Image (cartoon, rainbow, N blue to C red):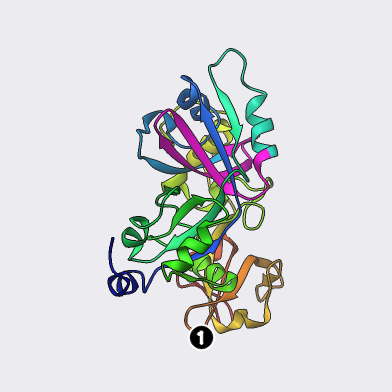
């Protein structure tokens, strides 16, 4: 056990915050092949310890969910925004016929917390009865999701881990470019509009539900709108849901999330930008640039 002085030094940059999540566990011998057939990433290649992002798509190729998938021993664990369990479980369950697959809603069974900062290993060594889902990516590269119970917050506070504010977490999320389903992504979106192709879509994995639409866009053209991070003081007067028009009055961007940036002189937002203006560095309005 480390002494309190060493512990304080080790955890000085570590912070935590509660974050409600939907957690779905998929078990059974056919779990990987099954999820592979209903998501955009290459699930059958995953080994215990692997993590990937994926979209769960409809027959029409629209986005029913954006999930982080963890491969653990004897299970796949899906993590996504709070309140998505009914939609995703009902969607997947209708396709289970003879497959050896079970879907378990684990949302609410464990308390879920974000933990981030370079000193996480020191904190992890002092916590008992918790499970780490790492990396998560919600608020940066060091971000991990911690599955605990009602006593987890007290344990973290005893270790002198500081609790981050919800505003701080939102700023870090936008700076990390992590999209939240139901906020930045909805069932109206095509996967490619979310602009996470390199990390959430495999174009070589073969057939899956909705694959025809995704493949056709990749082969024959492009989407008209792309998720982008925008920065600049011009965002100060704007809010999520606001639209930005060009000189001709036509819409060129729609904001989905807005926050203060870590730089006190800047604002930051996520939103959909028309493909003609989506290149990094493009000024889309006075004081607003595509990051």
Image quarter (top left, top right, bottom left or bottom right) of the N terminus: bottom left
Vertical placement of residue 192 versus 173, above or below: above
Quadrant housing residue 8: bottom left
Check if residue 70 falls in the magenta segment: yes
The magenta segment is 56-85
The residue under label 1 is 264
Vertical placement of residue 225 versus 291, above or below: above
Residue 45 at what x, y percent from top left?
37, 31
Q: Is residue 98 left or right of residue 70?
A: right
Q: Is residue 16 visible?
A: yes
Vertical placement of residue 26 versus 233, above or below: above
| Total residue callouts | 1
Residue 139 at what x, y percent from top left?
47, 63
Check if residue 260 falls in the magenta segment: no
Vertical placement of residue 185 versus 239, above or below: above
Q: Is residue 291 visible?
A: no
Depth order, front residue of 250/168: 168
Residue 42 at what x, y percent from top left?
42, 33
Depth order, front residue of 216/95: 95
């Amino acid at each position: 056990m480390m002494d309190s002085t060493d512990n304080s030094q080790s955890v000085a940059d570590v912070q935590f915050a509660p974050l409600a999540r939907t957690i779905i566990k998929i078990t059974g011998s056919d779990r990987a092949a099954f999820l592979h057939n209903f998501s955009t990433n290459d699930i059958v290649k995953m080994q215990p310890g692997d993590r990937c992002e994926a979209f769960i798509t409809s027959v029409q190729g629209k986005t029913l969910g954006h999930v982080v998938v963890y491969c653990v021993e004897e299970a796949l664990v899906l993590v996504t925004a709070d309140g998505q369990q009914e939609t995703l479980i009902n969607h997947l369950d209708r396709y289970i016929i003879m497959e050896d697959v079970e879907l378990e809603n684990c949302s609410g069974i464990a308390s879920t917390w974000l933990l981030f900062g370079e000193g996480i290993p020191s904190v992890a060594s002092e916590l008992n009865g918790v499970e780490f889902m790492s990396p998560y990516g919600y608020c940066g590269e060091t971000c991990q999701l911690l599955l605990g119970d009602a006593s987890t917050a007290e344990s973290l506070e005893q270790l002198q881990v500081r609790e981050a504010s919800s505003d701080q977490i939102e700023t870090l999320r936008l700076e990390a470019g992590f999209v939240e389903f139901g906020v930045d992504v909805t069932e109206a979106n095509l996967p490619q509009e979310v602009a996470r192709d390199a990390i959430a879509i495999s174009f070589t994995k073969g057939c899956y539900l909705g694959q025809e639409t995704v493949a056709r866009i990749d082969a024959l053209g492009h989407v008209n709108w792309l998720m982008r991070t925008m920065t600049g003081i011009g965002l100060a007067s704007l809010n999520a849901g606001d639209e930005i028009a060009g000189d001709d009055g036509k819409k060129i961007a729609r904001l989905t999330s807005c926050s203060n940036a870590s730089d006190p002189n800047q604002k930051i937002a996520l939103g959909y930008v028309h493909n003609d203006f989506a290149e990094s560095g493009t000024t889309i309005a006075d004081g607003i640039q595509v990051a």
